[in-house]
Amino acid sequence: MMTTDRETSIDQKTTIERLLNDEQVLVHINPQTTGVIIPPHLSDNRTVTLRLSKFFKGRLSTNEVEITAELLFGSEYFVCSIPWNSIWGASSVRGEEFVWTEAAPPEILHMVLSHQESARATRGFDGRPHARTARSGASHLRRVK
């Protein structure tokens, strides 16, 4: 399930804090946003995905401005600062996906919207997926004689 900013932009902080109550959450960030502090080798990427958890060894805190997380990269910890306005998406361990389009880099936004259109095209009028797979068009069922 993917939720866009129309439904959740007001609750971005609340949503991510709720997701942090699970085992872990993936946050998708725009590293070009002012205030983002991540390891230098990741700074030039168009988007960065960070795995956050309250159960990791490093400390994790949230406030009204940002998430601060001490994350392990290779064999060294790095204190990351992730402003709320840099987070364009989040994915939960339960398969929930959230997108806040105002923070997404343009090419990422285009990719996300294309994915949503593709998902709609593979669903029937009742909103359920078609019996055929979108990948090959063939059924996953095999005929048994």
Image: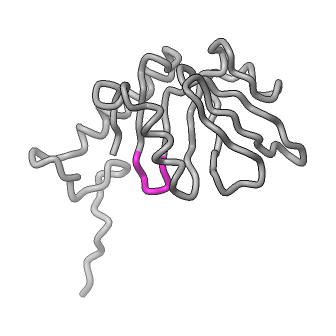
**Percent from the top left, x then y, of residue 63?**
59, 30
Between 10 and 141, the one nearer to me in the picture: 10
Q: Quadrant of the C terminus?
A: bottom left
Where residue 38 sits, quadrant-wise, is: top right
The residue under the point 37% across, 49% down is 135
User: Residue 36, position in %: x, y?
Assistant: 69, 21
In the displayed structure, would residue 114 be above or below residue 27?
above
- Residue drawn at 9 percent across, 44 percent down: 125
Main SS of the magenta part reads: loop
Q: How many numbered marks have been drawn onto this rendered protein structure?
A: 0
Seen in the image, is 83 located left or right of residue 121?
A: right
Give the image quarter of residue 84.
top right
Residue at 32% across / 66% down in the picture? 140
Q: Residue 99 at x, y = what percent?
A: 42, 31
Q: Residue furthest left?
A: 125
In the image, residue 32 above or below residue 29: above
Q: Which residues are magenta?
A: 92-96
Out of 86 and 55, give the one closest to the viewer: 55
Q: Is residue 56 left or right of residue 107?
A: right
Position in image of residue 124 (x %, y %) = 14, 47
Q: Residue 94 magenta-drawn?
A: yes
Residue most toward the front?
Answer: 63
Left/right of residue 144 with respect to residue 53 in the rendered view: left
